[in-house]
Amino acid sequence: MKGLVVIFFLLAFTGAFAQKRDTFYVDGPKKKMVMCSAVIDSNRSYITINGRVYNGILDSLNTDNIIQFKVLKAAEAVALFGKKGRNGAIQISMRAPRIPGKPAAGSSPGENEITDYILDGRRSNKMEIARLGRRILSSKYEKKIAADPSTNKLTLTAVTRNFAIKQYQKKLSRLSSGYKTYLNKHHQNDSGLAFIINGEKYAVSTDDRVKKIYELFSDDKVLDLNLKYVLGYGRTPSFVKIDTK
């Protein structure tokens, strides 16, 4: 780890001027490595991850998953990649290269295989989703197989945390007047509300809790669950109890 940090600093001069180039630095007491893409696309290095060209932004990568990387200066990069390497190159090996929000279990398809991108229920693109980084709550791949293999489609559907919260709040408010009243009193913020889902208590509004509640209501199968809102008193918080059938 220390060796990687030293290499980062030795090579950072290739992109340290006013963020005109890709930059690398160490942040915080835990020496967390941070990678940032150049502000202007024409100043970006030629990047590959596990041998595949990467056109996303470095900011969205989880550096904890980096196994090995190599930074090439312009002359060496041009010799290897041609004109594409005129700004230098970065070769990265990662445990599981993936778009933020994709569960760690299982392998993800290559980005070149994805034909459509859906973000918060609307059409999007790879760059927009990559820029959101950790604001992506979850993502999943859906494959549609056609009679003609050349027309097969692979769609990446991503959901941001804010979108997920708004969606489940809207649907939950329709089912519970008590919950709706709570939201109105707390400026549409339910982080102080406890949720008990199938006997498991979610007292803090973590990503896990948001994702769990969103998925319960995302498919509109609201008739498959029992819901109860209980008003709290004193230091006892209000809570919503949800049991799926």
Image (cartoon, helix red, strand yellow):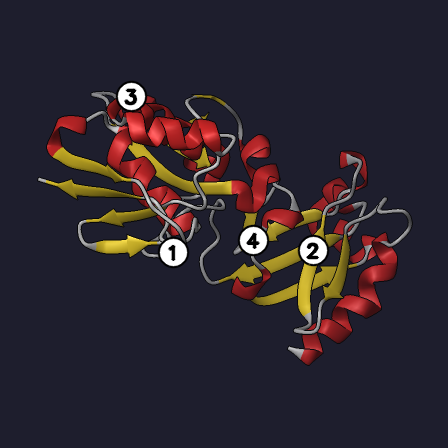
The image shows residue 180, relative to residue 10, as above or below, that is above
Name which of mark 3 and mark 1 comes first in the sequence: 1
Residue at image coords 47%, 49%: 98
Query: Which amino acid, by three-letter code, is at mark 1?
Result: Ala
Quadrant of res 43: top right
Q: Along the horizontal axis of the image, is 85 left or right of 191?
A: right
Q: Give the amino acid at mark 2.
A: Met
Question: Which residue lies under the disc numbered 3?
Answer: 174
| Amino acid type for the residue under numbered disc 3 | Arg
Mark 4 or 3, nearer chain start: 4
Vertical side of 154 occupied by 138: above or below: below
Rendering coords of residue 86 (x, y %): 81, 45
Alpha-carbon distance for marks 4 and 2? 14 Å
Q: Secondary structure at mark 2?
A: strand
Mark 4 in CB contact with mark 2 (< 8 angstroms): no
Distance of label 1 from label 2 (alpha carbons): 21 Å
Q: For the view shown, which residue lies furthest in the front direction?
A: 234
Of labels 3 and 2, the one closer to you: 3
Which residue in the structure is indicated by mark 2?
Answer: 35
Direction bottom: furthest residue: 2
Contact (Cβ within 8 Å) of mark 1 with mark 4: no
Q: Are marks 4 and 3 in contact (CB under 8 Å)?
A: no
State which tag comes first along the sequence, 1 or 4.
4
Q: Tag 2: Cα neighbours inside 10 Å, few (<14), some, or many (≥20)?
A: some
Q: Is residue 154 visible?
A: no
For the point 33% across and 36% down, the residue is: 214
User: Mark 4 or mark 2: which is in front?
Assistant: 2
**Measured Cα–Cα span from mark 3 to mark 2:** 43 Å
Q: Which residue is mark 1?
A: 104
Tell us which disc is closer to us: 3 or 1. 3
